[in-house]
Amino acid sequence: MKTKNMILGSLILSIVFITSISSRNDNNSVSISPKVQDTLITGQELFRLNCAGCHGTDLGGNPPNYPALTDIKDKLTKEEIRIQIKKGKGMMPPMSHLSDNEINAIVNYLFGENGNEQVTMVAALSPIEQGEMLFKSNCAGCHRASSNDPKPQNSGTQMCSMMEPAVLAGASKRFTKEEFLNILETGPCYMPSFSYLNKEEKEALYAYLKTLEGKGEAKRPTMGEKCPMIKKGRSCCGGGQN
Protein backbone atom coordinates (compact mmCIF):
# COMPACT_ATOMS: atom_id res chain seq x y z
CA MET A 1 0.00 0.00 0.00
CA LYS A 2 2.86 2.33 0.91
CA THR A 3 4.52 1.62 -2.44
CA LYS A 4 1.26 2.31 -4.31
CA ASN A 5 0.84 5.62 -2.50
CA MET A 6 4.39 6.62 -3.39
CA ILE A 7 3.80 5.77 -7.05
CA LEU A 8 0.48 7.67 -7.06
CA GLY A 9 2.11 10.65 -5.38
CA SER A 10 4.93 10.69 -7.93
CA LEU A 11 2.39 10.52 -10.76
CA ILE A 12 0.43 13.47 -9.35
CA LEU A 13 3.62 15.52 -8.95
CA SER A 14 4.58 14.75 -12.54
CA ILE A 15 1.19 15.89 -13.81
CA VAL A 16 1.39 19.09 -11.74
CA PHE A 17 4.94 19.74 -12.99
CA ILE A 18 3.98 19.20 -16.66
CA THR A 19 0.86 21.37 -16.27
CA SER A 20 2.95 24.11 -14.67
CA ILE A 21 5.48 24.06 -17.50
CA SER A 22 2.71 24.12 -20.10
CA SER A 23 0.99 27.02 -18.35
CA ARG A 24 4.25 28.96 -18.11
CA ASN A 25 4.90 28.42 -21.80
CA ASP A 26 1.39 29.66 -22.64
CA ASN A 27 1.89 32.76 -20.50
CA ASN A 28 5.22 33.56 -22.13
CA SER A 29 4.14 32.85 -25.68
CA VAL A 30 4.17 35.79 -28.10
CA SER A 31 0.91 36.53 -29.82
CA ILE A 32 1.72 36.96 -33.49
CA SER A 33 -0.68 39.32 -35.20
CA PRO A 34 -1.80 38.36 -38.67
CA LYS A 35 0.42 39.94 -41.29
CA VAL A 36 -1.15 43.05 -42.80
CA GLN A 37 -1.70 42.25 -46.42
CA ASP A 38 -0.30 44.61 -49.02
CA THR A 39 -2.92 46.61 -50.87
CA LEU A 40 -2.63 46.08 -54.60
CA ILE A 41 -4.08 48.53 -57.08
CA THR A 42 -3.70 49.18 -60.80
CA GLY A 43 -2.62 52.35 -62.55
CA GLN A 44 -6.06 52.60 -64.10
CA GLU A 45 -7.71 52.49 -60.67
CA LEU A 46 -5.27 55.06 -59.30
CA PHE A 47 -6.12 57.33 -62.22
CA ARG A 48 -9.84 56.89 -61.56
CA LEU A 49 -9.51 57.76 -57.88
CA ASN A 50 -7.13 60.69 -58.29
CA CYS A 51 -7.53 62.17 -61.77
CA ALA A 52 -10.87 61.24 -63.33
CA GLY A 53 -12.75 64.05 -61.56
CA CYS A 54 -11.13 66.54 -63.92
CA HIS A 55 -9.88 64.44 -66.82
CA GLY A 56 -12.70 61.90 -67.10
CA THR A 57 -12.56 58.14 -66.77
CA ASP A 58 -12.09 57.99 -70.56
CA LEU A 59 -9.27 60.60 -70.47
CA GLY A 60 -11.54 62.87 -72.53
CA GLY A 61 -11.54 65.73 -70.00
CA ASN A 62 -13.91 68.68 -70.31
CA PRO A 63 -11.99 71.48 -72.09
CA PRO A 64 -10.96 74.19 -71.56
CA ASN A 65 -10.85 73.80 -67.77
CA TYR A 66 -10.25 70.06 -67.77
CA PRO A 67 -7.93 69.06 -70.63
CA ALA A 68 -8.10 65.70 -72.37
CA LEU A 69 -5.22 63.30 -71.80
CA THR A 70 -5.82 60.95 -74.71
CA ASP A 71 -2.73 62.23 -76.54
CA ILE A 72 -0.67 63.25 -73.52
CA LYS A 73 2.26 61.04 -74.52
CA ASP A 74 2.66 63.13 -77.69
CA LYS A 75 2.98 66.32 -75.62
CA LEU A 76 4.93 65.39 -72.50
CA THR A 77 7.58 62.89 -71.54
CA LYS A 78 7.03 60.42 -68.74
CA GLU A 79 9.35 62.38 -66.46
CA GLU A 80 7.51 65.65 -67.17
CA ILE A 81 4.22 63.99 -66.27
CA ARG A 82 5.68 62.52 -63.09
CA ILE A 83 6.87 65.95 -61.99
CA GLN A 84 3.52 67.55 -62.81
CA ILE A 85 1.58 64.92 -60.87
CA LYS A 86 3.90 65.28 -57.88
CA LYS A 87 4.14 69.06 -57.80
CA GLY A 88 1.06 70.21 -59.69
CA LYS A 89 0.93 72.89 -62.36
CA GLY A 90 -1.46 75.69 -63.18
CA MET A 91 -4.91 74.68 -61.95
CA MET A 92 -3.79 71.13 -61.21
CA PRO A 93 -3.09 70.58 -57.48
CA PRO A 94 -0.02 68.60 -56.40
CA MET A 95 -0.59 64.91 -55.75
CA SER A 96 2.12 64.73 -53.10
CA HIS A 97 0.15 62.06 -51.22
CA LEU A 98 0.94 59.54 -53.97
CA SER A 99 4.05 57.39 -53.75
CA ASP A 100 6.55 57.17 -56.62
CA ASN A 101 5.26 53.66 -57.41
CA GLU A 102 1.71 54.94 -57.62
CA ILE A 103 2.69 57.87 -59.83
CA ASN A 104 4.66 55.56 -62.11
CA ALA A 105 1.62 53.29 -62.41
CA ILE A 106 -0.56 56.26 -63.46
CA VAL A 107 2.03 57.39 -66.02
CA ASN A 108 2.27 53.89 -67.47
CA TYR A 109 -1.51 53.80 -67.77
CA LEU A 110 -1.53 57.16 -69.60
CA PHE A 111 1.07 55.78 -72.01
CA GLY A 112 -0.97 52.64 -72.61
CA GLU A 113 1.60 50.49 -70.84
CA ASN A 114 0.71 47.98 -68.13
CA GLY A 115 -2.45 49.84 -67.15
CA ASN A 116 -3.74 46.71 -65.43
CA GLU A 117 -0.47 45.82 -63.72
CA GLN A 118 -0.91 45.88 -59.97
CA VAL A 119 1.35 47.98 -57.76
CA THR A 120 1.61 48.07 -53.98
CA MET A 121 0.16 51.10 -52.27
CA VAL A 122 2.05 52.67 -49.37
CA ALA A 123 -0.35 51.07 -46.88
CA ALA A 124 -3.85 49.75 -46.58
CA LEU A 125 -6.15 52.70 -45.97
CA SER A 126 -8.94 53.02 -43.45
CA PRO A 127 -12.18 54.58 -44.77
CA ILE A 128 -11.24 57.96 -43.24
CA GLU A 129 -7.73 57.79 -44.74
CA GLN A 130 -9.22 56.90 -48.11
CA GLY A 131 -11.62 59.83 -47.76
CA GLU A 132 -8.71 62.17 -47.03
CA MET A 133 -6.89 60.90 -50.11
CA LEU A 134 -9.99 61.50 -52.23
CA PHE A 135 -10.30 65.01 -50.78
CA LYS A 136 -6.68 65.86 -51.62
CA SER A 137 -6.91 64.59 -55.19
CA ASN A 138 -10.45 65.64 -56.09
CA CYS A 139 -11.54 68.53 -53.86
CA ALA A 140 -8.53 70.43 -52.52
CA GLY A 141 -7.92 72.35 -55.75
CA CYS A 142 -11.14 74.31 -55.15
CA HIS A 143 -12.25 73.67 -51.55
CA ARG A 144 -10.49 74.48 -48.30
CA ALA A 145 -10.78 71.75 -45.69
CA SER A 146 -10.80 74.42 -42.95
CA SER A 147 -11.32 78.18 -43.02
CA ASN A 148 -7.89 78.37 -41.37
CA ASP A 149 -6.25 76.87 -44.46
CA PRO A 150 -4.88 79.08 -47.26
CA LYS A 151 -7.16 79.61 -50.23
CA PRO A 152 -6.89 76.84 -52.83
CA GLN A 153 -5.07 77.63 -56.05
CA ASN A 154 -8.25 77.50 -58.14
CA SER A 155 -10.35 79.63 -55.83
CA GLY A 156 -11.81 82.58 -57.76
CA THR A 157 -10.85 81.17 -61.16
CA GLN A 158 -13.04 80.13 -64.06
CA MET A 159 -12.76 76.54 -62.86
CA CYS A 160 -14.63 77.56 -59.70
CA SER A 161 -17.03 79.91 -61.45
CA MET A 162 -14.94 82.95 -60.39
CA MET A 163 -15.69 82.49 -56.70
CA GLU A 164 -14.43 80.53 -53.73
CA PRO A 165 -16.33 77.29 -53.16
CA ALA A 166 -17.54 76.38 -49.69
CA VAL A 167 -15.15 75.39 -46.93
CA LEU A 168 -15.84 71.70 -46.36
CA ALA A 169 -15.36 71.66 -42.58
CA GLY A 170 -18.91 71.38 -41.28
CA ALA A 171 -20.30 70.05 -44.56
CA SER A 172 -21.33 66.88 -42.74
CA LYS A 173 -23.54 69.08 -40.51
CA ARG A 174 -25.04 71.00 -43.41
CA PHE A 175 -25.78 67.94 -45.52
CA THR A 176 -26.97 64.49 -44.63
CA LYS A 177 -24.93 61.63 -46.04
CA GLU A 178 -27.66 60.97 -48.61
CA GLU A 179 -27.65 64.63 -49.71
CA PHE A 180 -23.86 64.69 -49.92
CA LEU A 181 -23.73 61.50 -52.00
CA ASN A 182 -26.38 62.97 -54.29
CA ILE A 183 -24.28 66.11 -54.83
CA LEU A 184 -21.23 63.98 -55.67
CA GLU A 185 -23.28 61.94 -58.10
CA THR A 186 -24.75 64.84 -60.10
CA GLY A 187 -22.16 67.62 -59.78
CA PRO A 188 -24.32 70.76 -59.56
CA CYS A 189 -23.20 74.14 -60.91
CA TYR A 190 -19.48 74.34 -61.73
CA MET A 191 -18.71 71.15 -59.81
CA PRO A 192 -17.91 68.06 -61.90
CA SER A 193 -19.81 64.85 -61.32
CA PHE A 194 -18.08 62.16 -59.28
CA SER A 195 -20.47 59.44 -60.42
CA TYR A 196 -17.50 57.19 -61.19
CA LEU A 197 -16.85 56.81 -57.45
CA ASN A 198 -18.64 53.85 -55.90
CA LYS A 199 -20.83 54.22 -52.83
CA GLU A 200 -18.14 53.08 -50.40
CA GLU A 201 -15.69 55.65 -51.78
CA LYS A 202 -18.25 58.45 -51.52
CA GLU A 203 -19.07 57.41 -47.97
CA ALA A 204 -15.35 57.39 -47.15
CA LEU A 205 -15.11 61.02 -48.29
CA TYR A 206 -18.10 61.91 -46.11
CA ALA A 207 -16.49 60.08 -43.17
CA TYR A 208 -13.36 62.20 -43.58
CA LEU A 209 -15.43 65.39 -43.66
CA LYS A 210 -17.03 64.39 -40.36
CA THR A 211 -13.56 64.50 -38.78
CA LEU A 212 -13.37 68.19 -39.76
CA GLU A 213 -16.41 69.20 -37.71
CA GLY A 214 -15.53 72.07 -35.39
CA LYS A 215 -12.19 72.68 -37.11
CA GLY A 216 -12.49 76.03 -38.85
CA GLU A 217 -16.04 75.82 -40.14
CA ALA A 218 -17.41 78.60 -42.36
CA LYS A 219 -18.96 81.48 -40.41
CA ARG A 220 -21.40 82.42 -43.16
CA PRO A 221 -24.06 80.27 -44.85
CA THR A 222 -22.83 78.53 -47.98
CA MET A 223 -24.63 78.34 -51.30
CA GLY A 224 -25.66 74.81 -50.40
CA GLU A 225 -27.40 76.06 -47.27
CA LYS A 226 -29.14 78.91 -49.07
CA CYS A 227 -30.20 76.94 -52.14
CA PRO A 228 -32.44 73.92 -51.47
CA MET A 229 -31.80 72.66 -55.00
CA ILE A 230 -28.16 71.93 -54.16
CA LYS A 231 -29.18 69.35 -51.57
CA LYS A 232 -31.06 67.56 -54.33
CA GLY A 233 -27.99 67.58 -56.51
CA ARG A 234 -29.42 70.23 -58.83
CA SER A 235 -27.91 73.53 -59.87
CA CYS A 236 -28.73 76.96 -58.58
CA CYS A 237 -26.57 78.54 -61.26
CA GLY A 238 -27.73 77.26 -64.62
CA GLY A 239 -26.56 73.67 -64.88
CA GLY A 240 -23.90 71.32 -63.63
CA GLN A 241 -21.01 69.55 -65.27
CA ASN A 242 -22.34 66.02 -65.46
Image (cartoon, rainbow, N blue to C red):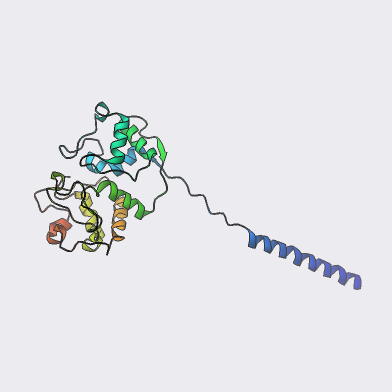
Residue positioned 56% across, 54% down in the render: 32
Q: Quadrant of the N terminus?
A: bottom right
- Residue 163, how many percent across, how many down? 13, 51
Q: How many marks?
A: 0
Quarter the C terminus occupies? top left
Q: Residue furthest left?
A: 238
At 8% from the left and 49% from the top, the residue drawn is 238
Q: In this view of the protein, can residue 224 be seen by the observer?
A: yes
Q: Quadrant of residue 77?
A: top left
Q: Position of residue 68 (x, y in %)?
A: 21, 34
Quarter of the image where one finds residue 17:
bottom right
Q: Is residue 224 above or below residue 44?
A: below
Residue 217 sits above or below residue 153 on the image: below
The furthest residue to the right:
2
Q: Is residue 117 left or right of residue 93?
A: right
Give the residue at x 34% y 51%: 130
Q: Is residue 1 visible?
A: no
Residue 223 position within the rendered picture, expressed as x and y whole percent measured from the top left: 14, 58
Q: Residue furthest top?
A: 74
In the displayed structure, 159 sits above or below 222; it is above
Most foreground residue, 25 or 77: 77
Q: In the shown orientation, is residue 152 left or right of residue 1?
A: left
Q: Residue at x 28, y 56 (%)?
A: 206
Across and down, in percent, residue 185 comes to: 22, 50
- For residue 117, above or below residue 209: above
